[in-house]
Amino acid sequence: MTSGDSAEALAAARHSLAARDAELAAADRALIAAVAEAHAMAVESIGRIDTIASDVETAATGQPKDSPAGARELSRHLVASNREIAAVVSEAKAVVDAKTVALRELTERYRSTLG
């Protein structure tokens, strides 16, 4: 092997490593984005549920429940709150499902890049 061949082999190896490093860096950025988005959704969902819980507590302590009208109003409020909670959970589940798919794709991306 001549010094020219060695230099070419070294350049090819460097190029290959640089390409692999670039692919891994891109996968790392995608992973960071997916985790950050999932975290943001979790924080938002928790905040929304905390707000609903506070509203329910306020309604439960502020309504006269000993009258039929008061009981009906509280019941309506609880049903509406339950729907809001279900919507929050449904939205969070949709994000989780999407992030699960993205993480599976990233797993394959890492595997193929690392060989």
Image (spheres, rainbow, N blue to C red):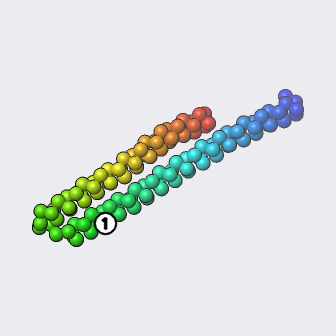
Is 48 located above or below residue 6 in the figure?
below
Extreme residue toward the top, this view: 1
In this rendering, position of residue 56 left or right of residue 9: left
Extreme residue toward the bottom, this view: 62
Amino acid type of the residue tagged 1 in the rendering: Ser
Residue 10 percent across, percent down from the top left: 79, 36
Counting labels gives: 1
In this rendering, position of residue 32 left or right of residue 42: right
Q: Which residue is mark 1?
A: 54
Which part of the image, by quadrant, shows the C terminus?
A: top right
Q: Residue at x 87, y 30 (%)?
A: 2
Residue 104 percent across, percent down from the top left: 49, 38
Q: Out of 15 and 34, give the one closest to the viewer.
A: 34
Quarter of the image holding residue 1? top right
Q: Residue at x 80, y 37 (%)?
A: 11
Q: Out of 75 and 7, give the one closest to the viewer.
A: 75
Residue 107 seen in the current view: no
Q: Out of 105 and 40, give the one closest to the viewer.
A: 40
Residue 95 percent across, percent down from the top left: 44, 46
Q: Residue at x 40, y 49 (%)?
A: 92
Q: Secondary structure under badge 1?
A: helix
Quarter of the image holding residue 20? top right
